[in-house]
């Protein structure tokens, strides 16, 4: 189970870097007046790893960690559904900010672990 826990932690760090890069990319696309690219599809594996850790080792010391995990999994799909009817530039900017917000959620989740 230590391997799953370690993988969960490493994936969390990668998730922060990924969502930061995607967020900056979205803002860059917005400045260029372009629509979002396929890079906005998020990493769902982190949520599955978190669920495995929860099932096999029990809840983390901080219940707030679970809240950040659920919010992290829901943030990008919710943002994508809210901006679906906007202009491509607006979609890129909104998804860029949502990705940066998601990176912040991941950082908070790591801090509370």
Image: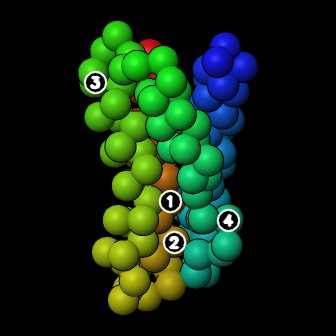
- Is residue 13 in view from this perspective? no
* Mark 3, residue position: 64
- Is residue 1 in view from this perspective? yes
- The kind of secondary structure element at disc 1 is helix
**Mark 4 vs 2: CB contact within 8 A:** no
- The kind of secondary structure element at disc 4 is helix
Q: Is disc 1 surrounded by few (<14), some (14 to 19) or many (20+) residues within 10 Å?
A: many
* Mark 4, residue position: 39
Q: Tell me: 48 left or right of 68.
A: right
Q: Tell me: 98 left or right of 36.
A: left
Residue 70 horizontal/vertical position (percent)? 35, 43
Could you say which is closer to the camera, residue 72 or residue 50? 50
Work out how far the residue at label 1 is from the one at label 4, CA to CA, in angstroms. 11 Å
* Mark 1, residue position: 96
Work out how far the residue at label 4 is from the one at label 2, CA to CA, in angstroms. 11 Å
Work out how far the residue at label 3 is from the one at label 4, CA to CA, in angstroms. 29 Å
Q: Which residue appears at 67% of the width and 14% of the height? A: 2
Whether 61 is drawn above or below 15: the answer is: above
Residue 64 horizontal/vertical position (percent)? 28, 24
Residue 61 horizontal/vertical position (percent)? 34, 10
- The kind of secondary structure element at disc 2 is helix
Q: Is disc 2 surrounded by few (<14), some (14 to 19) or many (20+) residues within 10 Å?
A: many
Check residue 56 in the rendering and tell me which mark sits there, or answer none.
none
Residue 48 horizontal/vertical position (percent)? 55, 44
* Mark 2, residue position: 92
């Amino acid at each position: 189970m230590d391997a799953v826990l370690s993988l969960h932690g490493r994936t969390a760090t990668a998730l922060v870097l990924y969502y930061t890069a995607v967020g900056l990319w979205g803002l860059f696309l917005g400045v260029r007046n372009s629509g979002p690219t396929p890079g906005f599809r998020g990493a769902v594996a982190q949520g599955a790893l978190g669920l495995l850790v929860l099932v096999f080792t029990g809840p983390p010391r901080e219940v707030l960690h679970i809240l950040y995990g659920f919010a992290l999994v829901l943030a990008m799909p919710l943002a994508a559904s809210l901006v679906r009817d906007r202009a491509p530039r607006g979609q890129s900017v909104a998804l860029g900010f949502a990705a940066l917000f998601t990176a912040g959620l991941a950082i908070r989740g790591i801090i509370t672990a």
